[in-house]
Image (tube, rainbow, N blue to C red):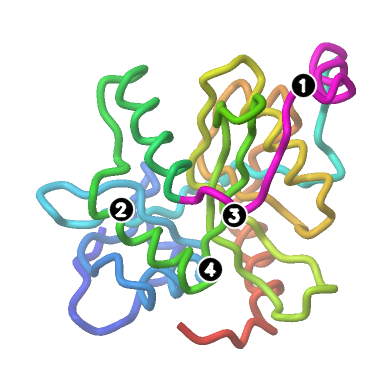
Amino acid sequence: MIILTDELKFPDPQLANREGLLAIGGDLKPEWLLLAYRSGIFPWFSDGGIIHWFCPAHRFVLFPDEIKISHSLRQILNSKKFGVTEDKEFEAVIHSCAQVHTYTKGNTWIDDDFISAYIKMHELGHAHSLEVWDHETLVGGLYGIVIGPQDSSQKKIFCGESMFSVESNASKVALVHLCRSKKYEMIDCQIYTEHLEKMGAKLIPREKFLMLVSKNVASDSRDI
């Protein structure tokens, strides 16, 4: 584990420890976040204001063409019960993720600093959200960072940060919508969860993940 200085630079992701922790320090300004995601690194939490940056030995990812949709979920999708929008209520989605995590787990890494940082990334066009609605009520959604080519015809990588659901299956509907958009080569789910595994996500070696990221961001010339 390496302590970062004021220099905008991350160590080789392969130096992460067994838990995936690579470095501490730096901050959540856009230049740090963009460099991190374009390097296959993500911030997971801060301890006393000190950011912890991760790059696990095995990355949990979902390739959109491999998504598994259960019979019950397919029925919900076909029923048109939920409406889905993109980037309509980014702030509401990130606040809802924090609130639901706190309610279900007792705490969350999505503190005020994280919320402010990702709202800024959204304003700059790097962070995006999907909202799931039951009529006029926001019942689920997800948000993350998008990296990749500027050309809208080329597929990118969606680095998923968090999702929430206050109505059964709402977050799954958001994920299906993300996969069906045909915008993304890969969805980075970061850390293993059983329910995402059931939807087709899988662990791949860090080396393969970093290769895919490097290939994808090679033509990403967007500035802060």
Q: Is residue 168 above or below residue 133?
A: above
Amino acid carrying label 4: it is: His
The answer to the question of whether label 2 and label 4 lie on touching residues, with beta carbons closer than 8 A, is no
Q: Which residue is mark 3?
A: 87
Label 2: element kind? helix
Label 4: element kind? loop
The residue under the point 30% across, 58% down is 116
Amino acid carrying label 1: it is: Lys
Query: Of marks 3 and 2, which one's residue comes earlier in the chain?
Result: 3
Q: Residues within 10 Å of mark 2 (few under 14, many from 20)?
A: many
How far, Cα to Cα, is label 3 from label 4? 11 Å
Q: Position of residue 176 (x, y in %)?
A: 76, 36
Q: Which residue is mark 2?
A: 114
Q: Which residue is mark 1?
A: 81
Name the quadrant containing residue 222: bottom right
Label 1: element kind? loop
The residue under the point 71% across, 74% down is 215
How far, Cα to Cα, is label 2 from label 1? 32 Å
Q: Position of residue 111 (x, y in %)?
A: 25, 44
| Direction from residue 178 to residue 110 in the image, left or right | left
Amino acid carrying label 3: it is: Asp
Q: Which residues are magenta?
A: 71-90
Q: Which residue is mark 4?
A: 126
